[in-house]
Amino acid sequence: MRRPWLVVAVIALTGCAGADGPSAVEQTARSDRTASPSVGETSVPGPASTAPARAAGAVRVDVFATDLEIPWDLAFLPDGRMLVTERPGRVRLVERDGAVRPDPVARVEVSAQGEGGLLGIDLDPQFGEGQPFAYLFVTTRDGMQVQRWRVAADARMTREAVVLGGIRAGRIHDSGRLRFGPDANLYVATGEAGQGNLAQDPRSLNGKVLRLTPEQYRTQTDRPTIFSLGHRNPQGLDWQPGSNRLVITDHGPSGFDGPSCCDEVDVVVQDGNYGWPAVFGRDHGAFRAPVMLWQRTIAPSGAAFATMPGTAWTGSYLVAALRGKALHRLTFADGDITGEEVLFPGVYGRLRAVVEGPDGAMYVTTSNRDGRGDPIRSDDRILRIAPPPA
């Protein structure tokens, strides 16, 4: 039987905050982030390689791309290049060798106040089969929008339509992640925009996981399915390989560090209610409880499962932490979290997105220029992390 919760003590973390955490507390003593543990600089194969990424022994980290401004999310094109969103409103093309094309392939009009701006990106599941579209999650003056953009052969992008609007934006808790599921539907995670009551309001699209069918996201809709509700600020979502369980990360409230706190991981089911703002922490009563709680705020952001077979990480859930400034590797069994490994605490600063590349490496963006970090000259960066062999 799956335990309804699991509290894990997190070591080597400091501070307490909600959402990404207030910037004043972020200015802690700076570690030397110019070096990396077990690093060789960009000498391993890039994402276009047909050989799966493997570290020779310990985990290997390479700085894959540099000099980006608040990279929020990324998506791989079929040829191994990647599209990277920058929160101020640009989409950048990163070549297979990590070179960043100087001119953006798209400029997106955004309202970048607070935590908003150009956020999530994902590609149509039939991108190479006559549907060359990228979907962007954008904060605008009129609220949050999911937009559809056509991607040309040279990767330049042209906006086609607003697929979904009517999502309230706030200075905090805009969420911003969207992903296509194994069922070819589009799942959109929304925050409650700093108004907790919206998460329980069935008339609101905020504080929810929304689902759009192919017919909806290839045209437009104002009636997505509310797949789940009662979320605060979910920023990571992916499906467990094999079971196809949807697993998300969500930011808990600040100021409650302890056994019943705080940030969480949820296994999401259709029509599930995860309780915010009525409940949080371990005891959820009639609401669905998290499968994991951190006792100190880490501000979990992007997350992805490692699916490439033959590594020590295969099946693990990798979670980027903003306040926690680390990558958390969680192991699962039967829908329950059985262990945690905290990787690179403090080495690279704030971590935002986690995406598995076509080579099996995990690509992780830093978020040190977002006003809450402590950037170095080469920030912000994309890290390429090769897992150790099984």
Image (cartoon, helix red, strand yellow):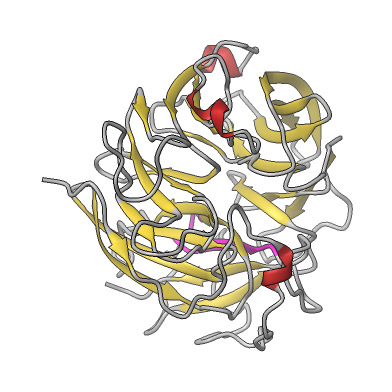
Residue 155: give x, y in percent of width and height: 76, 41
Q: Is residue 141 visible?
A: yes
Quarter of the figure that contains the N terminus = top left
In depth, the one of 156 and 223 nearer the eye is: 223
Q: What residue is drawn where x is 82% and y is 44%?
A: 113
Residue 385: give x, y in percent of width and height: 51, 70
Q: What residue is drawn where x is 81% and y is 29%?
A: 158
User: How many numbered badges does the structure rendering display?
Assistant: 0
Quarter of the figure that contains the C terminus = bottom left
**Would you say residue 55 sits in the magenta stretch?**
no
Residue 351: give x, y in percent of width and height: 60, 64
In-image side of 77 versus 10 (left or right): right
**Would you say residue 362 sits in the magenta stretch?**
yes
In depth, the one of 251 and 255 nearer the eye is: 255
Residue 99: give x, y in percent of width and height: 75, 65
Q: What residue is drawn where x is 59% and y is 66%?
A: 323
Q: Is residue 82 visible?
A: no
- Magenta-tinted stretch: 356-367
